Image (spheres, coloured by chain):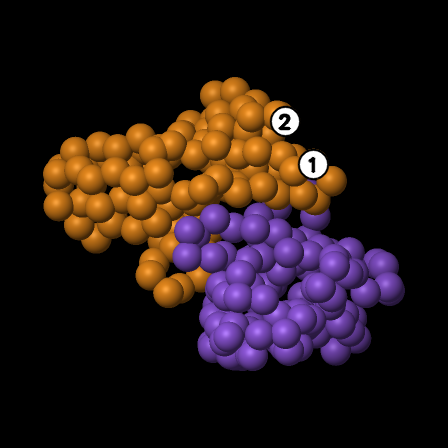
């Protein structure tokens, strides 16, 4: 069974600064997909970034980027130029292939401070 | 991105009654949908996998007779909480598989059982 671990229950960052959220996972699969989701107070799940394990290049989406270390089974999220609107719960998630469910970590509550 | 509509967003019911929650994919067909439950300040916990035209697959510990899932078409899955009790109060959220290892989430339903 796959597991996802987020070891930072809460984090805070000053506005405009950079913050990194950690995520590790465990799997015996060779091909899989990794995700970071944002859940603001509205509780809508918003996809932040997606990484395919067979791609060595780290995914980036504007201010969001990942550091994917396949051998170490690590998938951290870096948020640059943090904004107040980034305040939310962030979930790291794993999926083996299509039509299978996402496995979520416990989440990291991020607060961006003005 | 693709849109998943979930209704109702909030429901309050009396103990012993049944509540139906709908999850619709508006601009794509989803042969597979997933139902999650989320307690306050916790992560999403998979309840069941819903496949169009076949019986749902329930996770261990989830009562299939209490949480009835029907996936009668490629765009609609329903979750019915039967004989609801206060301990069933929770946030329920669905996701739909749009193919290409892309999942989209509904906006969730907050169920409160009095």
Chain A's colour? purple
Q: Is B85 in front, or is A77?
A: A77
Observer able to see residue A74: yes
- Residue A75 lies left or right of residue A87; in this view the side is right
Image quadrant in which you'd find residue B74: top right
Question: How many numbered dots are placed on residues in this image?
Answer: 2
Local packing at callout 2 (Cα closer than 10 Å; few below 14, some 14-19, many 20+) is: some
As helix, strand or loop, the secondary structure at mark 1 comes to loop
Relative image position of residue B83 (x, y in whole percent): 19, 37
Relative image position of residue A96 (x, y in whole percent): 68, 53
Local packing at callout 1 (Cα closer than 10 Å; few below 14, some 14-19, many 20+) is: some
Residue at coordinates 62% horizontally, 70% vertically from top-left?
A82
* Dot 2: chain letter: B
* Dot 1: chain letter: B
Residue B28 tag number: 2
Chain B's colour? orange
Relative height, residue A44 to residue A91 (above, below): above
Residue indicated by mark 1:
B99
Residues behind callouts 1 and 2 on a single chain: yes
């Amino acid at each position: 069974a796959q597991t996802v671990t987020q070891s930072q229950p809460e984090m805070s960052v000053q506005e405009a600064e950079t913050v990194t959220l950690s995520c590790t996972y465990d799997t015996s699969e060779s091909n899989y997909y990794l995700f970071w989701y944002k859940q603001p107070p509205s509780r809508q799940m918003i996809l932040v970034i997606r990484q395919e394990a067979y791609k060595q290049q780290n995914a980036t989406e504007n201010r969001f980027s990942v550091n994917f270390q396949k051998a170490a089974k690590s998938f951290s999220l870096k948020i640059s130029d943090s904004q107040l609107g980034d305040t939310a719960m962030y979930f790291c998630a794993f999926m083996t292939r299509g039509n299978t469910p996402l496995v979520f970590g416990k989440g990291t509550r991020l607060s961006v401070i003005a | 991105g693709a849109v998943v509509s979930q209704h109702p967003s909030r429901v309050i019911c009396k103990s012993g009654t049944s509540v139906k929650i709908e999850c619709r994919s508006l601009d794509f067909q989803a042969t597979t949908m997933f139902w999650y439950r989320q307690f306050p300040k916790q992560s999403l916990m998979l309840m069941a996998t819903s496949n169009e035209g076949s019986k749902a697959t329930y996770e261990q510990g989830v009562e299939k007779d209490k949480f009835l899932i029907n996936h009668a078409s490629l765009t609609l899955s329903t979750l019915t909480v039967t004989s609801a009790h206060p301990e069933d109060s929770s946030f329920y959220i669905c996701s739909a598989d749009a193919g290409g290892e892309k999942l989209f989430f509904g906006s969730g339903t907050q169920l409160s059982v009095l």
